[in-house]
Image (tube, rainbow, N blue to C red):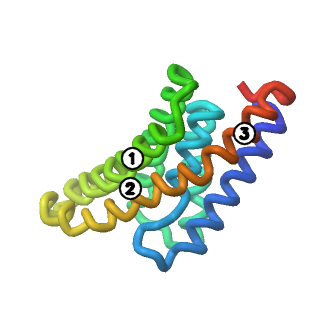
Amino acid sequence: MNTYRITLLSMLAAAAVAGRIAMANLPNIQPVTAIIIVAGFWLGPLSAVLLAGIVTFLSNMILGMGMWSVWQIVSWSLIGLIAGLLGKYMPSLPVWALSIYGFFSGLLYGLIISVTMYTIGQPFLVYYLAGLPMDINHAIANAVFIGLLSPVLGTLFTKYQKRHALV
């Protein structure tokens, strides 16, 4: 991993943390998942997993740490890992298809968090159904953020990929 990639990941992490904190009052609408998906798609699975850990740790330092922090890292890492594999094996995937993946990633994120609550004794179905409106907000926000961020970041990643050997 070269200095340029570390700097790029740091800037993406800063944008994701700032976006998450700025939108903390909105019900489960934040750009973190979308940034992790776009970064994973263009920069690879390892970058997405690193980004997931950094963003979760830094944003939860301000918003609050708890047992959910570990599962947020697991959820976002899995989502970024899949996005990285999509980028590796289907690099010409259109933005609308990546947005659909982002939509389902919001639902997957909510499912993983709900399953972890089940492991500590909460009734799964009740907890999951109560959180479903928030998961749908997250899913819609992911699709919108990917639609907005992917063309801009994708163009920059493509432009600098050759110059700085990102892959």
- Provide residue 80's location: percent of width, then percent of height: 50, 40
Q: Residue at x 49, y 56 (%)?
A: 144
Secondary structure type for disc 3: helix
**Mark 2 or mark 3: whose residue is earlier in sequence:** 2
Badge number at residue 155: 3
Relative to residue 153, is residue 15 depicted above or below?
below
Mark 1–mark 2 CB contact (< 8 Å): yes
- Provide residue 154's location: percent of width, then percent of height: 67, 39
- From the image, tell me which residue sits under label 2: 139
Q: CA distance from mark 2 to mark 3?
A: 24 Å
Q: CA distance from mark 1 to mark 2?
A: 7 Å
Q: Quadrant of the C terminus?
A: top right
User: Label 1 is placed on what type of residue?
Assistant: Ser
- From the image, tell me which residue sits under label 1: 105
User: Label 3 is placed on what type of residue?
Assistant: Thr
Q: Is residue 45 toward the left or the right of residue 137 in the image?
A: right
Q: Is residue 2 toward the left or the right of residue 104 in the image?
A: right
